[in-house]
Image (cartoon, rainbow, N blue to C red):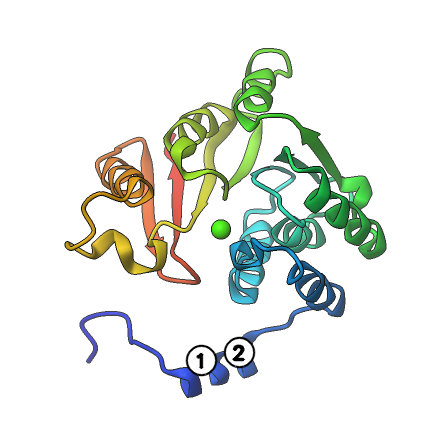
Amino acid sequence: MARQTIVFDDRLFDYIRSVSLRQPDVLARLRDETQRFPQANMLLTPEQGQFLGLLVEMMDARRIIEIGTFTGYSALWMALALPEDGRLICCDIDEKSTAVARRFWAEAGVAGKIDLRMALALDTLESLITAGGGTSAFDLVFIDADKSNYLAYYEKALVLLRPGGLIAIDNVLWGGEVADPTIRDDKTVAVLRDFNARLHADSRVSLSLVPIGDGLTLARKRA
Ligand code: CA
């Protein structure tokens, strides 16, 4: 019996994909198109995207916030899983990458479910809290943006979520560097270590760090 998550080699990884991944063609083409961006390595893995979509379905989510949209890959997975009356608010500031996002959302027929807010995410979240009546109104918040603001995004997400709502946070393992004791002076690693430790001690949420992609923490707001 394994005492920890199995380490998978390429063969096992290919097998996992072959028996579980169902990436629609439009998402595969969006991945291809994203490769021309220098930050293409920021893309979620297809497995993570599908996992997010499954979470949306399992929660019967209707209202979602995404912090950090890039070319709209994760948003498209979630939007496809949303019912027709579902709404996804996307936060980003980059015109070039979100132009790609808009094009693919339209092609996939989900543009009407997505409300892209081109502003600093903290400002958008604050406006949802104060002006939008957004407190306890959201089912799911996906955080995948600048790591230095992760804790601030998380705190605002907790305000915006209904009890039982879920926060999903990407890149919490940072390629494994968070656990590497020889890395002592990297700012992002320090931020993520602190973030992970704080969530571990946070009794306001139920918690699981899912070792998928670059590490995806799920934190469910307790009643
Ligand atoms: Ca990411």
**Of the numbered discs in the image, which one, if any, rests on residue 105?**
none
The spot of residue 196 in percent (x, y) is 28, 42
C-alpha separation, residue under disc 2 versus residue under disc 1: 6 Å
Q: Residues within 10 Å of mark 2 (few under 14, many from 20)?
A: few
In the picture, measured across the screen, residue 86 lies left or right of residue 192, that is: right
The spot of residue 142 in percent (x, y) is 52, 42
As drawn, 123 above or below 174: above
Mark 2: secondary structure = helix
**Of the numbered discs in the image, which one, if any, rests on residue 17?**
2
Mark 1: secondary structure = helix
In the picture, measured across the screen, residue 16 lies left or right of residue 33, that is: left
Q: Quadrant of the C terminus?
A: top left
**Of the numbered discs in the image, which one, if any, rests on residue 13?**
1
Question: Which amino acid lies under the numbered mark 1 shown in the image of this protein?
Answer: Phe
- Front residue of 147/133: it is 147
Q: Residue placed at 41% from the left, 62% from the top?
A: 212
Question: Which amino acid lies under the numbered mark 2 shown in the image of this protein?
Answer: Arg
Kindly indicate whether the residue at mark 1 contacts the one at mark 2 (C-beta within 8 angstroms).
yes
- Front residue of 75/101: it is 101
Furthest-top residue in view?
130
